[in-house]
């Protein structure tokens, strides 16, 4: 009882974080037809700065950490990525009026990971003083890539079964390469390597970390504006996509929280790490996913997967899932 | 002096940009010009000026000019066949005249 | 195979962009492509690459392709009548051929 | 006598501020044909940062302030906005070779407010250690919107009287909405609301405020370059516009200073607030004004109003008016 | 009503932009529209979206529309003669129709 | 023997600097086909920030320095600029299959100066704690402009001799003006003037200097990516250009180091100053050079000079020359 009250209180407090205020501000601006627009170049620069910062920090810290502990959480991350796609295939994909290609592309996107949501979760954990392993953000690709691969492979198997065959043949290798080459993962991995090799502590603290929260606040604003503006895409799309985008982030996150808890018990995975695992499961890819899926499942309508993820899935992940999983961790782990 | 020529304009997703320009290089177009834009068709509304880390869905407008109109048409047809079954995009062909024909 | 078509190019201030594209949507153009630019006419010199928080005076170049030439001309005329009495801008019409006519 | 010497000294000292040095640097670069150009995306980002910063600060501080004190200065701001348009209509508008539409659009622009000039004035006050109310920057829309409305209404009345009628009908509501939606006012208001609701002190100080002066210095550089480059627009325009742009900022500012003084006596409006009121009166709109006026008075030639405001009015406001009103305040209020 | 007109499209390096637009002003074009792009020809591959502090080698696409086709051709020829011996670029001419001919 | 070991150790340590890590990271990203791209607007803004910062710092410090000491190093800088072009003309220009115009344009580019390399050298000196005169970065135009002038004059003399004459006549004045107007030199000079006149210490430290190293790290990343991407231009170009770009930066730098040493002995030019002189000699122009040379030597193929400088010359200057000359200075001057 008491813990439920604590849970609710934690949840509500978190809703008042500046980051969410900027997200809501973005909704409000777009809804009111404001002409304010953050230039595209700034948006792309912010993404670079955030991921380079996350990477550098991880790389600098990783020296002192026991990388063998990474194995189980990484395996779970990959497992979750695949499970999400399979779940999507068997729920969303079997619904009436839902095209299988669209369903698989959407499930792939929700299985993949959003760098922006990850960054927001890291700041939220910081604010609540919950620690996590330096390598935890590096779980990202372990979930991202399997989800994209599985979605594309299932789509092409389905196509072969039903259609006259033909079409582009996409290899698993090309999907992996495409994901690693995306601007988000490139920046994250480059940061990890540079951070690890040259330990640029001063540069990290005096520049990348210095600007981190500020840039994240602007990114939240952009995500809010984008979410609202893309709502119109949804009108062209079956209602089921909206329902899926509302519910699945929470389901995926809880699933990951459970597996993360197992890793906590078995190898001492930290509470903050469990939250991050749950958040990257709940998040959906905004950077590497869409183009990879567009190339891999050309029959899928981008309106379906972009509309439901940007306008519904991402806000749910940011507004509901992050506070929810943090509050849950506070109860479960007593942090 | 002006010489008869043919202009082919291809409007496609940026995703295809590299493949189309490679094809133009190989089939012997003497050059091409590319501008970035936005657009609307049967699919997504694409807005160039909105923050978009995913630039692959942006629209590019590629045009090439050729003296040999039949060859230009062949190239255009090949692009349409290779890419525009699966992906978005349109192609149109207009007659033109060029100056300094030695450039083409 | 190539089909006869008509291309209409509208050069206008960005101020009018939304109204023109809305009109195109309503009058049944199957799509349009838009690029941003600068320009000079009887009024202001508009420079795309200069800092300008006021982007409304920038130039946009909107083109749409239609199989039905008469309809294309009607739409062009309507835009000219509705907007180009008060505001800056020009419209021109060129003949073209398109591939994959089912897209239009 | 002594106070006159003090006045002169204060004025001259202020002319040596780094901000004005950047403005003059901008003139010099453009005059010398330099190829240096600050990218448009950076310019728009800077405007966002400055106004968000001003807004956040206001919002954070406003909690402790007595908002009833805002009423009289806000009323005066609106009054000044209207007076400026009326004065413009009866002076500039009646001059030979001056088209009435052009005159009204120009007067509307000079009645409206420049966010950049406002930011420069806030830094200048800071440098001289003169305090102002946290809500003072929020006087901006109270002057901006009435000026734009009145200019457009007068123009359409004039058109109805003289011409065959017809033309676009612009409602007062649409002008208000257009102004509030402009990128400048959107950012300012959003900042106010976020600042007020979530009190993001750390984010404000560690990011927005940290970069404020630096970005302002770049903005001054851009304004200087723009002022010089747009001089050519003036050649196509009657000389009266230049005269108006030279004199009216000072007149408008002094008028506002007077009304501000009354508010000081009546409700204790602070000396810094009086200066800000005078500066926003002296300033002319560079963001919300031009497009709103273009839409509302389509017959007006943008060369007339943009040339005279950007190339003459803004430099006068920055170089003459800000130091002048601060020096005046130092004498009048003995601060 | 539509009037016959001629469109001239000039694709050149940005280096030449000011000289070409100045020439257009002087020879009596009533206006022009300019968009920025990238391109490939016999020389450098020019990529608009790559960091380039040296923007002089970028491609600009300048088009102007004129009622008097002969005059348009003369101007086109003059630009070709003045600039396109030394520098990169192409020019092509297409027939068009315009609305609101009083604007040209 | 011992000093040789010291030399090697210093060189190797410097190779582990964060700045070079970002450069190598850029190679790696481009080589792996990463889609990460720093927007053009950010690149141009970074260049502005770095040069303005260098300029402001120089301007602020210059007050206390004896400008007469500048004379000899400045004369040497100009001398080196000319020597580099003459050497290029007599070596590269006489090789088989090398077009004279291409050779002169390339030599001009290598005689001219890279602002980015200069900034990297300043940070490297800082890291090793080696001081230099505040005015040393201002040696830049003294080498840059003479090199460009001489290259263009030689090309037009050669053209007159061989060809039917005609062609554009470029005056020396127009070359000087063009260089000074370039975005790099404009920002540097403007910074110098503002720094000198208004001494904006706080603005410099709290903004420009604060962001200096961070922006430089991103610039290094861009330069790495650009170097790799432009390698393809080299395929169209005679092999000699690659050889020239590999060797000449080292030769030019050593030549300048020698002259700098003479200035050290004669007028007390600082060890850090000698290194900077050597580095600007080793560097090749990436901003003002290419367009000036394109306009001045229209017959030269930009692929030749841009490919060899961006892809080979610049990496050599950054990776080999800066650590080399610093290690040399540590030996020679015992700093
Ligand atoms: N009728 C048209 N006229 C001009 N551009 C078009 C037309 N139809 C499609 N496009 C362009 O082609 C892109 C892709 O079209 P779609 O695949 O139908 O969404 C659009 O975003 C437009 O830029
Ligand atoms: N003759 C023309 N050829 C091409 N574009 C033109 C022409 N006249 C005007 N324009 C374009 O239309 C815009 C508005 O023209 P104006 O209202 O005359 O200033 C200009 O900025 C140009 O982009
Ligand atoms: N055949 C062509 N079709 C379209 N654009 C071309 C063509 N040839 C050259 N261009 C354009 O002209 C620019 C300069 O060409 P070049 O001087 O041959 O490198 C190229 O970058 C292209 O933008
Ligand atoms: Na996910
Ligand atoms: Na005002
Ligand atoms: Na050099």
Image (cartoon, coloured by chain):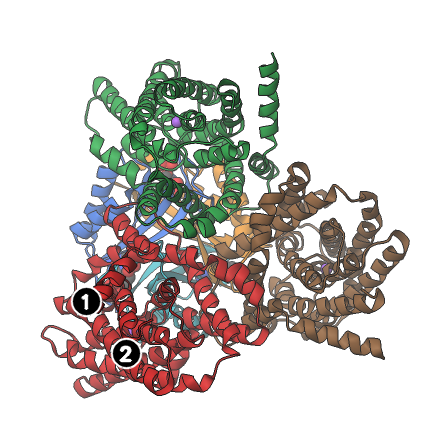
Chain colours: A green, B blue, C orange, D brown, E cyan, F red
| Quarter assignment of residue F227 | bottom left
**Residue E44 percent location from the top left of the image:** 25, 62
Numbered circles on residues, count: 2
Mark 1: give few (<14), some (14-19) or many (20+) Cα within 10 Å. Answer: many
| Quarter assignment of residue B52 | top left
Give me the C-alpha separation between circle 2 and circle 1.
17 Å
Q: Quadrant of ligand 1?
A: top left
**In the image as oriented, which residue stretches furthest toward the front?**
F2
Mark 2–mark 1 contact, CB under 8 Å?
A: no
| Quarter assignment of residue F295 | bottom left
Q: Is residue A200 above or below residue A294?
A: below
Q: Which mark is residue F256?
A: 2
Subunit ID for the residue under disc 2 = F
Query: Could you tell me which residue is drawn at 32 percent across and 50 percent down?
Result: A198
Give the structural element (helix, strand or loop) at label 1: helix
Query: Could you tell me which residue is drawn at 54 percent across and 58 percent down?
Result: C52
Give the structural element (helix, strand or loop) at label 2: helix
| Mark 1, residue position | F246
**Residue E27 percent location from the top left of the image:** 43, 74
């Amino acid at each position: 009882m008491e813990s439920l009250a604590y849970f609710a209180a934690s949840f509500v407090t978190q809703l008042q974080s500046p980051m969410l205020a900027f997200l809501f501000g973005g909704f409000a601006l777009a809804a009111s037809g404001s002409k304010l627009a953050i230039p595209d170049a700034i948006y792309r620069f912010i993404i670079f700065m955030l991921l380079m910062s996350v990477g550098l920090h991880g790389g600098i810290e990783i020296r002192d950490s026991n990388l063998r502990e990474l194995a189980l959480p990484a395996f779970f991350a990959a497992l979750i990525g695949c499970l999400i796609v399979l779940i999507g295939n068997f729920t969303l994909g079997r619904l009436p009026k839902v095209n299988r290609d669209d369903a698989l592309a959407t499930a792939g996107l929700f299985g993949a990971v959003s760098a922006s949501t990850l960054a927001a979760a890291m700041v939220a954990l910081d604010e609540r003083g919950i620690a996590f392993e330096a390598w935890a953000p590096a779980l990202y690709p372990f979930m991202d890539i399997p989800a994209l691969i599985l979605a594309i492979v299932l789509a092409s198997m389905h196509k072969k079964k039903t259609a006259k065959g033909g079409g582009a043949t996409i290899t698993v290798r090309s999907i992996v390469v495409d994901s690693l080459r995306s601007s988000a993962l490139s920046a994250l991995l480059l940061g990890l390597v540079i951070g690890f090799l040259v330990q640029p502590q001063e540069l990290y603290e005096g520049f990348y970390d210095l600007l981190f929260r500020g840039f994240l606040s602007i990114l939240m604003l952009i995500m809010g504006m984008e979410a609202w503006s893309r709502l119109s895409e949804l009108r062209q799309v079956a209602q089921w996509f909206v329902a899926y985008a509302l519910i699945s982030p929470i389901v995926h996150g809880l699933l990951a929280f459970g597996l993360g808890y197992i890793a906590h018990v078995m190898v001492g995975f930290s509470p903050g790490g469990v939250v991050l695992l749950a958040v990257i499961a709940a998040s959906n890819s905004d950077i590497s996913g869409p183009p990879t899926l567009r190339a891999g499942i050309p029959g899928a309508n981008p309106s379906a997967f972009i509309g439901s993820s940007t306008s519904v899935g991402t806000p749910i992940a940011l507004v509901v899932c992050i506070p929810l999983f943090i509050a849950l961790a506070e109860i479960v782990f007593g942090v | 002096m002006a010489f008869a020529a043919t202009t082919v304009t291809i409007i496609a997703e940026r995703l295809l940009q590299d493949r189309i320009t490679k094809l133009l290089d190989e089939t012997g177009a003497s050059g091409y010009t590319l501008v970035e834009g936005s657009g609307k068709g049967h699919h997504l509304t694409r807005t160039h000026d909105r923050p978009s880390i995913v630039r692959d869905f942006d629209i590019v407008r590629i045009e090439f000019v050729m003296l040999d109109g039949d060859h230009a048409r062949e190239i255009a047809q090949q692009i349409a066949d290779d890419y525009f079954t699966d992906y978005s995009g349109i192609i149109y062909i207009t007659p033109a005249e060029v100056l300094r024909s030695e450039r083409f």
